[in-house]
Amino acid sequence: MTLANGTLTKELNARSRTLVDGDNRAAARAMLKAVGYDDEALAKPLIGVANTWTEIGPCNFHLRKLAADVKAGIRAAGATPLEFNTISINDAITMGTEGMKASLISREIIADSIELVARANMLDGVIALAACDKTIPGAAMALIRLDLPALLLYGGSILPGNYEGEEVDIVSVFEAIGARAKGHLSAEELRAIEDVACPGPGACGGQFTANTMATMVQIMGICPMGMADVPAEDPAKADVAYRAGEMMMQLLESDLRTSKIITRNALENAIASAAATAGSTNAVLHTLAFAREAGIPFTIDDIEAISRRTPVIADMRPTGRYMALHLYRAGGVPLLAQRMLAGGYLDGDALTVTGQTLAETAADAIETPGQDVVRPLTNPIKESGGLVILKGNLAPQGCVVKLKGDEPDHHRGPARIFEREEDAMAAVQHGQIVPNDVVVIRNEGPVGGPGMREMLSVTAAIVGQGLGPSVMLLTDGRFSGGTRGLMIGHIAPEAALGGPIGLLQEGDIVEVQVKERRLDALLSEAELQARRASWRPAQANYVSGVMAKYAKLVSQADDGAVTL
C-alpha cells in the first residue's frame, strides 16, 4: 500500500525495519551502503532473491540473467531486491559416482541456507530461483519454514537436442552408453549423441525430477501458473521473471504467506499432477518432506490412494514420447490443470501465490489444436496414476515404483546382490545381467549411502542393452525417472538399518505383484529372523564431515528423508 506522498506504509516492510531502522542500526546501513544501497532503497521492503546459480551444468547456468530480470521487476514495483546464492549439485553430472551421494544431501543444505539468510537479514519476502532436481524442493522447503510472502520461480527446461533427425536428451546418452557396452553403437556414434543431447541452458527435458517438481509447484500454488512452463532459452522467460518480481508487492500487500498456500489440499493436488504425468518417484520423497516442514499429516499411503484414483493423461518422457517443450507448446501445465479439474482430480478451491484459486489460474488455458501430449480424460494412457506404493516383507514401510502402463505387473526372479551402484553398473556393462534377474543395489539409502544415490545410469544402461522389460531392479536408493520396466526404489527401512533388503542373499527369489501392491522375498519368516539375528551393519562410508552429519540426522525415505 502506498501513501499519497509516495512512501510505503510500515506494514509492508515491518520485518526489515529491525535490521535497518534507527540510530543503533547505522553500522548495518553502512555495510549495505558499501555495496550500493542508499537510504531510499533501504526504506523500502527488502526482498530476498535466493539464487541457485552455478556454472557446473546447464540446469542453473542461466539464473544469473534471470535474477537480473526478477530484480528489475521488484524495483519497478517499489521494493528493494537483495540477491544471495546457495549451492546446486547436478545429478546428471555426478550420476554413477560417489559425488551423486551429495545430491539429496544438498536439498537440506539449500533449504537451510535460504532459511538462514532470510532470517538473519529480516527479509520482508523472498523469491527463490530454482532449476535442478534438488534446488526446487530445497527452495520450497525453505519457503515453507519461513512462512513469508514468497514465491518460487523455475528456471525452465532445456531444449531437446537432435541426432540424425530425432530428438534426444540426457537419457538418450545414458541409453547410448548401454548400447555401446553391448556393441550396438560405435564410439563415434556415442560421442555424436553426447555432443548434441544438451544444446544449452535449462533442466533435463523429460518428466524427470526437475520438470516433475516444476509441474507440482505450479499445481501446489507456490509458483505462478504457467511461469515454470516457459523454457530456459525462450525469449519470453525474461518477461516471466520480471512479472514474478513485480508480484512481490501484491504478496506483501495481501500478506499472502506460504502457510496459506501449502495446505493438505495443495499437497494432494501436487501428487495428483505427478501421477497424471507419470512423473519422477522423487515426487513422493519431496512431497513427504514438504508435509513434514509444514506440519501436515501426510503419508505414503495417502500418496498411493491419490495416485490410484488419478489417470495418467500426459505422455511424457522417459516412459512416454514428449518433453517439457512439447507440453508447453500443447498448452502447458494450465491445460493439464484444466483437464484434471474437469475430471474432479484436483481441488480447484486451493489458493495460489497469484491470489487466485487453482481453478481460476487454469481457466484461461489454451489448448493447441491437434496436440496429443495431454490426452482427453476419455482416452487416458493408464487408468490409474504412475506412482505406486508397494509393501511386503522386503519393504514393510513401503517403496515406490513408477508405472506408465506397459510394464509387467508381475516379476519373479533370482536376486543379484550388489553392495554399491558401481558394482551393479560394471555387471551390466560386462553382460552379467540376464533376463529375469532381479538386480538389488543396497546400502545406498539415506543413511547407508549416505544420500540415496540416483540409479538412472544403471537403469538406462539396462534399457540400452534391450533388457528393460525383462529385468527388475530394487534399491534402497532412488530410481526417479524410470526408463521402462520395473524399477523399484526408496525401499524402507534401508539395508544400513537392518531392513530386509539387507538380508537378501545371491539367488534368493524375489517377487513383485503390482496389482496386489506387494514386494516380497520368497523366504519364510523363520529364515528372515535367522538372518536378522546374524546381521551386522556395514562400516560407515564417512565418519566426519557433512556426509557423516547427514547420516546421523536423516529420517527414512517413507518420512521424506528429512533432517528434522
Image: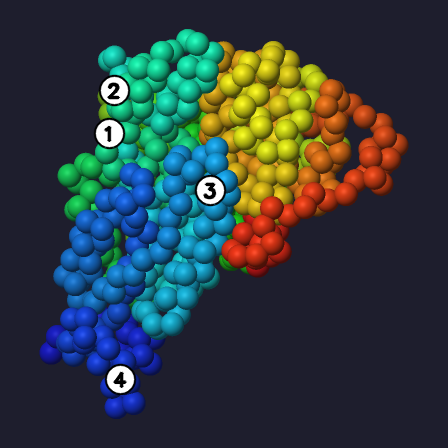
Q: Which percent across, then down, holds residue 49?
A: 28, 59
Q: Quadrant of residue 175?
A: top left
Number of other residues with Cα within 10 Å of mark 1, as a class: few under 14, some 14 to 19, many 20 or more:
some
Labels 1 and 2 touching (C-beta < 8 A): yes
Above or below: residue 314 compared with residue 263: above
Q: Amino acid at mark 3?
A: Gly
Q: Amino acid at mark 1?
A: Pro
Q: How many marks?
A: 4
Residue displayed at 81% across by 26% down: 523
Q: Quadrant of residue 376?
A: top left
Q: Can you identify the residue that label 4 sits on? A: 27
Q: Secondary structure at mark 2?
A: strand
Closer to the chain start, of discs 2 and 4, is 4
Residue displayed at 64% across by 48% down: 540
Q: CA distance from mark 4 to mark 3?
A: 41 Å
Closer to the chain start, of discs 3 and 1, is 3
Q: Which percent across, then down, holds residue 555?
A: 61, 51
Q: Is residue 223 visible?
A: no
Q: Can you identify the residue that label 2 sits on? A: 162
Q: Secondary structure at mark 4?
A: helix
Number of other residues with Cα within 10 Å of mark 2, as a class: few under 14, some 14 to 19, many 20 or more:
some
In terms of depth relative to the viewer, which is nearer, 490 or 323? 490
